[in-house]
Amino acid sequence: MGDAKGIEYVVLGREAFEEVAKLINDEFLTREPLSMGSRLSGSAAEGAIGSGLKKCLDSGVTIGAKDASTGALVGVRLSYIQTKGDDDSDIEPTSEFEKRVLGIVIEVGSKVDVFQDPGVEKVLYMYMLSVRRDYGGRGIGKKLVQVTMERGKDLGCQLAFTTITNVLSGRIFAGLGYETRYTLDMSTPEGDRGMDLAAMDGNRTVRIMTKRL
């Protein structure tokens, strides 16, 4: 597994929107299990996903991984902060793709009310994690998560929250001490959400995982 030498980790703002949207389109939506299972296509530059990207980039807790020699964005951990009592209904699915894919993410996320946890007033919500294929296996994804957690803690978050749709990401978060709070198993009759499981590269579940910061 090599290392991540030559990679710089920086806070990204709204000025990086086009570059981030391209990375999400090219590297995340083409490999994310729910996206593949929906058999539909979506765009990170518009609709609810585009609004989510802008929300994350405005939050101060979205971290990018850049190749120090070229300046190219090779990975991103999109996140935002939510405070207890905030209205979180500003990312509403619009297209059929978003209703299928984000609809499941929203449904599963609603099963865990982290603000019921003792002492939790501010939560770091991790939205999307993506690393370019040609930079895989260097620990960049794990480092992005770690830097984002440190940033969220510095800004007063007591808990980190993420939705896991693939086994590899689940291993990263479990290794960092995250615990599973809820699981939707789409291979069961009660968990069936109409996805093409054969297209999901062996992934069958959607999980909510959290960790105290």
Image (cartoon, helix red, strand yellow):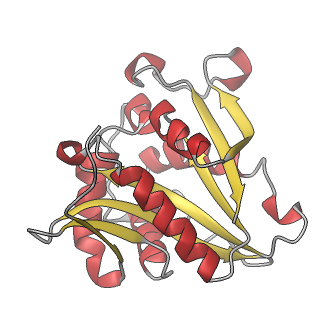
Which one is in front, 210 or 24? 210
Which one is in front, 65 or 52? 65
Where residue 143 sits: x, y (%)? 42, 58
Residue drawn 49% across the image and 25% down it: 203
Residue drawn 42% across the image and 25% down it: 200
Does 190 appear above or below 46? above
Where residue 172 sits: x, y (%)? 50, 43
State whether residue 165 appears in this view: no
State whether residue 39 appears in this view: yes
Does 130 appear above or below 64? above
Most distant residue in the left direction: 70
Where residue 81 sits: x, y (%)? 61, 75
Where residue 101 sits: x, y (%)? 50, 43
Q: How many marks?
A: 0
Which one is in front, 139 or 78? 139
Does 36 appear above or below 111? above
The C terminus lies in quadrant: bottom right
Residue drawn 39% across the image and 22% down it: 201
Q: Quadrant of residue 192?
A: top right
The N terminus lies in quadrant: top left
Whether residue 120 sits left or right of residue 140 in the image: it is right
Whether residue 66 sits left or right of residue 69 in the image: it is right
Whether residue 54 sits left or right of residue 179 in the image: it is left
Q: Quadrant of residue 5?
A: bottom left
